[in-house]
């Protein structure tokens, strides 16, 4: 089994303990815009640990970290809610969503509508759907459910086949993960390979994983990315605000979706 397979099996077990309903009556999601900007957007992540890196910053205060992100220009904040592999929680998501005035992404491995409802209930404005973890039917069903709640959806792909599946599902915002979720290896050329197809389709995309410096952000800009999702480097530095600002590099207008 791959790492992704192991995570999905664990999600199926966790779902057995979910209540039948999470209320979404009170939700008021914020819009998530990454296109038509002059500078690289940054989705800044709250991430205590990961399967590939182990413990990253287990003792940080997610609200303090989130406020630093917001004060230094983050376009959105990503919060890991997986407990078993990333030491995240929905408590973290709720606390962050209540503390900031920018959209919050629930970063998890979504395979069921109840997870989306739980994310919305906790204050998420954006959810992640990983194409590699879903059938076409599941992808369409979960995407439409999220949109019915007026949530933004980041549809994550890693190769051309997954990208075509995302486009068939009418995804509006693509996340190109430079990390292979089956091996957890990182290759920044993935964004380069897929970026041209995405921008030709008139869509915006977020380059995810492997972004550690302004030079990496410039490379992402050259691929046509409108934003980068950054976790590990922001969680490890003692000056996350300075790093976040440095990632907001100028975009080349002719490469980006309008």
Image (cartoon, rainbow, N blue to C red):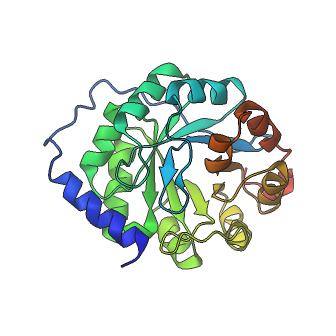
Closer to the camera in the image, 185 or 223: 185
Residue pictured at 60% horizontal, 71% vertical: 185
User: Splitting the image into 4 quarters, where does residue 94 fall?
Assistant: top left
Relative to 161, is 211 on the left or the right? right
- Residue 152 lies, in percent from the top left, at 48, 43
Relative to 239, is 154 on the left or the right? left
Relative to 185, is 133 on the left or the right? left
Residue pictured at 48% horizontal, 28% vertical: 96
User: Splitting the image into 4 quarters, where does residue 32 fall?
Assistant: top right
Closer to the camera in the image, 184 or 146: 184
Closer to the camera in the image, 12 or 163: 12
Relative to 150, is 72 on the left or the right? right
User: Quick check: can you spot residue 110?
Assistant: yes
177 in relation to 185, above or below: above
State which quarter of the image contains the N terminus: bottom left
- Residue 6 lies, in percent from the top left, at 34, 69
Tag count:
0
- Residue 136 lies, in percent from the top left, at 36, 70
User: Quick check: can you spot residue 39?
Assistant: no
User: Splitting the image into 4 quarters, where does residue 71 fall?
Assistant: top right
Closer to the camera in the image, 236 or 196: 236
Residue pictured at 68% horizontal, 50% vertical: 228
């Amino acid at each position: 089994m791959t790492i992704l397979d192991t995570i999905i099996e664990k999600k199926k077990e966790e779902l057995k303990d979910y209540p039948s309903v999470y209320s979404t009556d009170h939700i008021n999601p914020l819009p998530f815009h990454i296109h038509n900007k002059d500078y690289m957007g940054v989705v800044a992540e709250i991430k205590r640990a990961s399967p590939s890196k182990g413990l990253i910053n287990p003792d940080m205060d997610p609200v303090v970290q989130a406020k630093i992100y917001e004060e230094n220009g983050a376009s959105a904040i990503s919060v890991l809610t997986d407990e078993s592999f990333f030491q995240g929680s929905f408590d973290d998501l709720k606390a962050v969503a209540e503390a900031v005035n920018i959209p919050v992404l629930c970063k998890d491995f979504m395979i069921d509508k109840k997870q989306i409802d739980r994310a919305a209930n906790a204050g998420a404005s954006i959810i992640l759907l990983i194409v590699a973890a879903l059938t076409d039917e599941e992808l369409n069903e979960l995407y439409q459910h999220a949109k019915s709640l007026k949530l933004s959806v980041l549809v994550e792909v890693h190769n051309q086949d997954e990208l075509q599946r995302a486009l068939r599902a009418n995804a509006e915002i693509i996340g190109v993960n430079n990390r292979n979720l089956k091996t957890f290896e990182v290759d920044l050329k993935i964004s380069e390979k897929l970026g041209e197809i995405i921008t030709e389709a008139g869509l915006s995309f977020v380059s995810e994983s492997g972004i550690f410096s302004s030079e990496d952000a410039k490379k992402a800009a050259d691929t046509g990315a409108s934003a980068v999702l950054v976790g590990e480097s922001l969680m490890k530095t003692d000056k996350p605000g300075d790093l976040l600002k440095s990632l907001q590099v100028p975009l080349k207008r002719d490469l980006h979706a309008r």
